Structures are given as structure tokens and as C-alpha cells.
Image (cartoon, grey):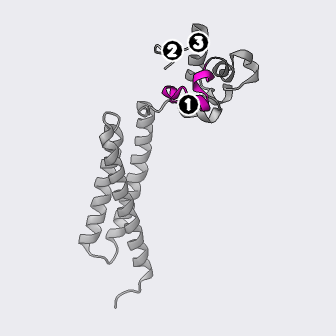
Amino acid sequence: MLEGAHPGAITDAERKLLLAWLAGPRVSEDYDNPDLGDSAPSELLARRCLECHARAAVKGTHADAKVSLEYWEDVKAVAFSTRIEPTPIKLLLASTHAHALALGSLSIVLGLLLCATRFSTRLTGALFGVAGVALLLDLAGWWLARESDAFVTLILAAGAAYAFATGLSIVLVVLDLWLPRRT
């Protein structure tokens, strides 16, 4: 609203101060920072905005204002961006590298242990396969979700399938160790 044609008695200098505060890294810390004096956002809001944006005004004569800016609890609900930015490529690459190596190695070792148990090769092979495919889809979903949020569902489903297959594999390996040997 501050960037657009917001009605009200706010000067361009005050608008710039509020926009700089909202874009800065210290939104909560500087809201009522006494070092800023009359330029503190809480002071600017109290001086220029509370005629329409006080809690009582929003519920009464200025219901069209919709947003109360009287207290920090009111301001913090609208002061932070709700847009979620994609993970930076550099961080995603490092995370994919670490997870692929660690979880891939874990899956191979666990799959080989599972194949050495007394359980049927159909069951062990299916669990091994589900874990491998689910891990691949999960990691691929990280990259695809950068382009479309529809792939977040793929991350959730593949992650759940991987966790289920891995958990069941661990349970079967431990059971094989605890169950008495067949004679």
C-alpha cells in the first residue's frame, strides 16, 4: 500500500522511511527503536496512520481501512512478506549433493542388509526399489518445485514413501537379527 497511491497525510520522506524499514533486515528490532526518535516506525505510524488504522477505527468509522496498525502485534502481521522465494541454486546444489551421497549410500547399505535377511526376495526387492525410486523423485522434486509449486506434492509423497520403505527395511533387518534361526 505504501508503494501505491495510498490515501492519507503521509509525506514522501516518511513513506521512504517506512519502505526502507520494511525492506531492511531489522524490521522487528527497529519498530520502536528509541535511537530513531521521531523517525521510528512506531512513531510514524502513530502520528500519520492511526486516525484510520487504530483498532477502534478499523471496527468503526474506517472499516474500509481493514488493517489495524496500532500495536506491534497488528503491524507484524502485515510487515513481513508472505512471498516464499525459491531456494538459491547454490544452496540447492550443495544440499542435493550432500543428501544424494548420504541417503544414497544409506539406501544401498540398507538394501544389501535387507537382501541378506530371510525374508522373501519379492518383499526385499520391492522395498529396495521403492526406496531408490522415492529418493530419486524426492531429490528431483526439489529442483522441479523451483519452477512450479505443483511439485511440492511430489516432494511430500516421495519423501513419505522413502521414509516408509527405509523404516520398514530397518525393522525387517532388526527382526531378522532377533528372530530365532530356522532349523
Q: Main secondary structure of the magenta part?
A: helix
Q: Look at the numbered disc 3 and give the secondary structure of its residue.
A: loop
Can you name the residue that lies furthest to the bottom here?
A: 183
Height in image: 165 above or below 120? above
Q: Look at the numbered disc 2 and give the secondary structure of its residue.
A: loop
Height in image: 30 above or below 141? above
Query: Real-space Cα distance between discs 3 and 1?
Result: 22 Å
Q: Are marks 1 and 2 in contact (CB under 8 Å)?
A: no
Residue 60 covered by magenta stretch: yes
Circle 2 Cα neighbour tier, 10 Å, few/some/many (<14 / 14–19 / ≥20): few
Q: Earlier in the sequence, mark 3 or mark 1?
A: 3
Q: Amino acid at mark 1?
A: Gly
Please give the range of residues in magenta. Answer: 49-67
Examine the image and state in which quarter residue 68 appears. top right
Q: Earlier in the sequence, mark 1 or mark 2?
A: 2
Quickly name the residue at label 1: 60
Q: Amino acid at mark 2?
A: Pro
Can you name the residue that lies furthest to the front here?
A: 61
Q: Amino acid at mark 3?
A: Ile
| Residue found at x 56% / y 17% | 19
Quickly name the residue at label 3: 10
Quickly name the residue at label 2: 7
| Residue found at x 64% / y 32% | 72
The one of 149 and 101 positioned closer to us in this rendering: 149
Rendered location of residue 123, percent (x, y): 27, 71
Rendered location of residue 32, percent (x, y): 70, 26
Residue 170 covered by magenta stretch: no
**Can you say which quadrant of the picture contains the C terminus?**
bottom left
Q: Please state which of the two labelled residues, at mark 1 or mark 2, is closer to the viewer.
A: 1
